[in-house]
Amino acid sequence: MNLSQILSIVLLLSIGWILYRHFAPVKGLTELNEQDFSRNMEDSGNKMLIDVREAHEFHQGHIPGATNLPLSRLNDRWSEIPQAKELFLYCQSGARSKRAASVLIRKGYGPVSHLKGGLAVWTGNRSKKVQ
């Protein structure tokens, strides 16, 4: 086996691992479609709605009542997330909220749900007012 074959195998394995991590289910995460996400939020009396997109994306429009805690800053902002609340996460497509949920679940937060498909599938109200 020559060096280029070894590099090709390593590259393919890396791509496979990235795809697996992106699409694999997260243990403890509830993935909800838009209707269930909205209904579960309404039914929860002790919740926190978190938008994990970057601040500039949040300011362009977000679900009313959401707190902006970007995935990129999550490690710096643990103190803003109460342990005792049910967490509802979303982002633009669902990928970042799924990653954030994985981190939060590992840190002991729960229950955690996210909007499968993110704001791309959200047809409900949006607010441009900074929360």
Image (spheres, rainbow, N blue to C red):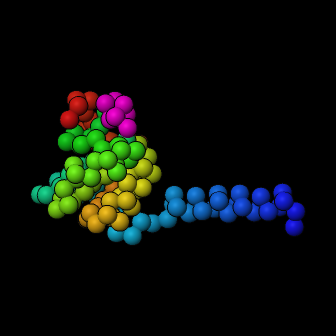
Label the magenta part by its dominant secondary structure: helix
**Depth check: 91 or 122 in front?**
91
Total marks placed: 0
- Which image quadrant: the C terminus? top left
- Which image quadrant: the N terminus? bottom right
**Depth check: 57 or 74 in front?**
74
**Depth check: 53 or 41 in front?**
53
Q: Is residue 39 visible?
A: no
Q: Residue furthest bottom?
A: 27
Magenta stretch: give its range: 54-60
Residue drawn 21% across and 49% down?
80
- Relative to residue 62, is residue 43 drawn left or right? left
Whether residue 47 is situated above or below residue 56 in the rendered picture: below
Residue drawn 34% across and 51% down?
75
Q: Is residue 126 magenta?
A: no
- Relative to residue 1, is residue 25 drawn left or right? left
Residue drawn 64% across and 57% down?
15
Residue drawn 25% across and 57% down?
87
The image quarter containing residue 14 is: bottom right
Q: Residue furthest front?
A: 76
Q: Whole-percent x and y of residue 25?
A: 45, 66
The image quarter containing residue 17 is: bottom right
Whether residue 84 is situated above or below residue 90 in the rendered picture: below
Q: Whole-percent x and y of residue 101?
A: 36, 58
Q: Is residue 106 visible?
A: yes
Q: Whole-percent x and y of residue 62?
A: 29, 37
**Depth check: 51 or 70 in front?**
70
- Relative to residue 42, is residue 5 drawn left or right? right
- Relative to residue 76, is residue 72 drawn left or right? right
Q: Whole-percent x and y of residue 40?
A: 22, 58
